[in-house]
Image: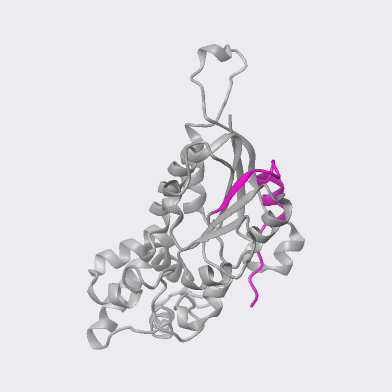
Amino acid sequence: MLHFPVLLEESIDFLVNNVDGNYIDCTFGRGGHSKLILNKLSNKGSLSSFDKDQDAFMFGSNIKKSNFKIFHDSFKNIDKYFDVNSIDGILYDLGTCSTHLDEAKRGFSFNKKGPLDMRFNINEGIPVSEWLKNAKKDEISEILYKYGDEKHAKLIANAIDKARNKNTISTTIELSNIIKNVYPQKNNKIHPATKSFQALRIFINDELNEFRKSLEMAQKIIKKNGFIVTIAFHSLEDNIVKNFFKGSVQSFPKDIPINDIEQKEFKCIAKKIRPSDIEIKNNKRSRSAIMRVFQKI
């Protein structure tokens, strides 16, 4: 399946407010958002994109434009590349890329047989198969519940523990079948392994902690009047956005003079934008997306 960037036009319309400005796409993926940003910019404007996935980095390296750079690095490190108050807009399109799910060798899909890996950067950390080999049963249960909201986490963790005592769980299909065979609700609309695979992916890539750190750095390097646009795909990501900006967003009660209120750094431009019915119909993976937009003041 091709990768279709979610909320493409909507996000870039908010993001690019100065065609001569400097922008960051923190999640290049297959470059859908980056390409549209570049189309909006003049020759004086610039775009820097980040992705710690080697395949994404190589894909981005094929874009030959003098005002474009791609960094093979995590977006948690954006402050290492840019000065304070130097960026006009920063975009986050969170979660996984469709190509990760469609390429069996990456180990993200519970429907395709491949090595049980799930790392965005295969040169960092350990694959899920290695972690499952040594993790305590209670730790597995905790991760499945915390990051996947899997209510049958203990049941699944017990099944994983029994299975790994016989043989190493080394492929996606092996893990998928272990979960499917013990899952009590057989008529679910979603595959029984969906939440567990999501939880393990988030955990093994430290996605939420990296996102928190990146937002802290984004707050420093964004210019006055610049925009931060986030597209989240589940509540854990979206809650980080809401909680991060909660103490920074301007809010003036009608009966209190502005001078008496602590000055805030951002104002909320768009609270909760979702894909249109047409986009969801054309791209089912977009259905859970929520976009929020904040402007530095």
Q: How is the image coloured?
A: one colour
Against 211, is 145 above or below?
Answer: below
Q: In the figure, residue 184 lies in which quadrant?
A: bottom left
Taking the image as shown, residue 42 lies to the left or right of residue 78, namely right
Where in the figure is residue 259, as x and y percent of width and height?
54, 12
Against 266, is 188 above or below?
Answer: below
Q: Residue furthest right?
A: 278
Identify the residue at image location x=52%, y=29%. 265
Q: Is residue 197 visible?
A: yes
In front of the other: 171 or 255: 171
Q: Is residue 35 magenta?
A: no
Identify the residue at image location x=32%, y=83%. 169
Identify the residue at image location x=34%, y=84%. 170
Taking the image as shown, residue 42 lies to the left or right of residue 146, namely right
* Quarter that holds the N terminus: bottom right
Q: Magenta residues, as a range?
A: 1-25
In front of the other: 120 or 276: 120
Where in the figure is residue 77, as x and y percent of width and height?
41, 52
In front of the other: 139 or 87: 87
In front of the other: 28 or 60: 60
What is the total number of numbered labels drawn onto the structure image?
Answer: 0
Q: Is residue 275 visible?
A: no
Q: In the figure, residue 270 lies in which quadrant?
A: top right
* Quarter that holds the C terminus: top right
Where in the figure is residue 103, as x and y percent of width and height?
53, 80
Q: Is residue 3 magenta?
A: yes
